[in-house]
Image (spheres, grey):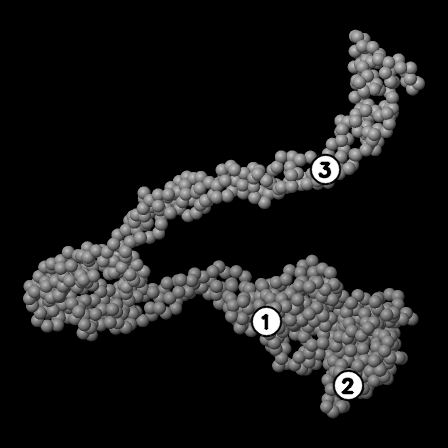
Amino acid sequence: MIAAPAPLRATVRLAFVIALAALAGASQLSCGINDYCLSCHKGDGGLDGGPGDATDGGGDGHGDGGCIATGPEICDGIDNDCDGVVDEGVLPGVGNLCTNQMGECAGGTQICMNGALTCNKKPSPEICDGKDNNCNGMIDEGDPGGGGSCGNAMGECRPGVSHCVAGAIVCQGAIDHTGDPELCDGKDNDCDGIIDEGLTNMGTCGSIPGPGPNCPSPPCGQCKFGTLQCQGGVPVCNGYIGPTFEVCDGIDNDCDGIVDNGFDLNNDPQNCGACGHACNLPNAVAGCSAGSCTIASCKAGYHDNNGVIADGCEFGPCFISGVEVCDGLDNDCDGTIDEDLGTPPAICATAGECAGTVATCGGAAGWQCHYGPTVSTDVNGNIIPETLCDGKDNDCNGVIDDHQPNKGQACDDGKLGVCKGTGSFVCDSTNLNGPAVCSITTPGGTASPESCNNKDDDCDGYIDNAPGTNANYGNTGNLIGQNWINIGNGKQMMAFEASKPDANTDNVITATVCSQAGATPWVNVTYPQAVAACAAIGATLCSEQQWHRACSVVAPSTYPIALASTGNVLQVVEAEDYSGIGFGTDTTVTPNVTHSFVEDYSPGFSGISAMQAVPDSGSSLSNANTIAMAPHLDFQFNFTKASSTYTIYVLMYSPNTNGNQVAVNVDGGAIGNGNRVTTASNTTWQWVKGTSTFTVTSGTHTVRVYMQKDGVRVDAIAIADGGAVPTLPSASHGNKWAYATNANTYAATTCNGHDFDPATDATLPTGSLANCYANLSATDHAFDMSGNVKEWTTAHQPGQNPIRGGSSSDTAVGIDCPLNFTLADDTFFFTNVGFRCCR
């Protein structure tokens, strides 16, 4: 016997245990111990003494109720090997191929199930899936799943029958019109249960005349296509209007694109503009044109003068006698008398108040002139001489108020200067028959102190004059608008660049000069003109020394300089702080050379500059020629120690041995070798002592320093009467620009240089920039010394005129106070060169 597989044996064991439990319960009722002997021989019913029974006395050792092994385990639901497990292990026949290997049973093998061998793949009822489900060798036999009705049975559709085809249910024999278009035939063509639905617009219908010259796109006129609709299963044309015969009704009846063709509504008086509209006009033969009634002609003696068609020929009876003339008759029967007579005859006056008067027709009286009420006429309308002073040419002779010869002439109220009121002679409005009277149209002003403005401010009859000066511009520079500031040493300078009295109006008066804020600077002026302008007010052009010291705000020495009255005298004075200066001409050379002392800025100078004798042409003057031919610098001192012997020191710089010598004297004394002062070496500043000493009386004396060799530079002089030797001065160089504050640091646009208005470099009115001034004191400010316009200063020598201060077109360096390189001759002038005066 083949042993059952392990799972089957476990199942048998479970069943066996359950059976034993049942037997145990039953034994309590009536059965003996071996009533249900599981190991008994077949047919053994209990204690019959048969083989295997406990009573048989067998030697199996099991006793009553024990399992007797019968051999290897087989699939029979019995524990053949008495191991307590039924049908376990490898059982005979299990795993063998089943007998039926067709269709879905193919591959089936024997398995042990419930104590018997069975196949793991068994036949099943046939279904429509393309398989042999019942394992009989045939696929889908018997049409599985077929035979039922299928498809749409509504409308024109017909159902079919379901059949199994190729493993799938297929509907065969159905007729399906679902989705077919609906037709107008009383049928449900698309099988949706509705007959002829949606067929309300099946297109246009009706017969319309084809395209023609006047109807390129039919339909035209009254015609229109209909709409084809399905009604009761039959197409019906709704809304169609076809052509008819043309009648005069404003409609295109025959649909050819022409309304009322055959009827001339433009020209037919019986149908003019509209059918049935007949023209009927009074006293006229009616016509029709462009659809409107017209007057074809008027009846005899009647005329259409108003151009209105509706009232026909309204004027008459009247018979034309010719063109219209001035006679009080309607000659041309146009309804108007004496009209369109052409240009009237030129019989009327046309000047003055007669202007515009033309002859008019007086009807039967003929042509007449009718003048206005301002024309002087007699009772017959004839013009007579005028008598009124009314500003009109009453007698039409081309002259207004010709009996008033002074009318329109200038007149005044008799006052002077700005107090004078002015006007002209006019007609007396209170007495037009009287003479013309003076009418003041510009009242005079009120007298005030005289100002520099080209006006007689104090009304004394004189312009810009000092009080009591009976001449125009007779002033000494003390007018309002001639503003002066103190620059030290008893000198004054104009606070503003010089301007003309009429600077901001005509700007042409040159008889005097002003100095005031907000004025146009006086430019395009030559050096001699500037000198003359200053002289006119008792002043001079400012010297370079005065100009530079004011611009740099460095206090000058007050001359004469008082020397010490006790102890040793050692007085040092900056060379540029001279009390006087002069040029000289060297006539010993050809051509002659004129020399001047000018400001110099060789490194190491003190004060605001040094002074150099220029040009450096190689001149060397003898002692005899020095006084007459050399430029010089003067310094005034008040000597109080008359018994002392004084020595003169000069702080000098020589560029070379051809420019290393000056000469000195006191009060113009003779020059000898002892008066010469010569540097010991070149290209360095050094104090050089004069070899001669001098004594003077108490009082003021002038020490003069002369050039003997040109090119020499002088920075300072010293007067001493003891053993002390002067040291190199270390005085400040002064401010560099004319600023109210921080004058040694350039501040763009503080003054009117190029950076203020680089686009135009325009000159500004004086004092326009609030912080562009040299701050000499709390009240003394010199405006615009840096920039705006350049300024003439006193000539070095004839024809060499220095210009200082820079202009609106110059950059920072060009408007600083030390810059002194510009010289011009007496004929030079320019739009950016002006001046200011000192006194």
Nearer to us in this view, 305 or 381: 305
Q: Residues within 10 Å of mark 3 (few under 14, many from 20)?
A: few
Quick one: label 3 or label 1, which is nearer the N terminus? 3
User: Helix, strand, or loop for circle 1?
Assistant: loop
Q: Classify mark 1: residues with Cα within 10 Å, few (<14), some (14-19) or many (20+).
A: many
Disc nearer the start of the sequence (2/3): 3
**Residue at mark 2:** 617
Is residue 542 toward the left or the right of residue 401 in the image?
right
Instruction: Indicate left or right for 5 with 503 as reference.
Output: right
Please state which amino acid type lies under the numbered disc 2: Ser
Amino acid type of disc 1? Trp
Farthest residue to the bottom: give it. Answer: 590
Residue at image point 63% right, 76% down: 531
Foreground residue among 484 and 190: 190
Which quadrant of the structure image shows residue 37? top right
Within 10 Å of the Cα at label 2, are there few (<14), some (14-19), or many (20+) other Cα atoms? some
Percent x, y of residue 578: 76, 73
User: To which residue does mark 3 refer?
Assistant: 99
Contact? badges 3 and 1 (CB < 8 Å): no
Please tell me whether mark 3 sits on a helix, a strand or a loop.
Answer: loop
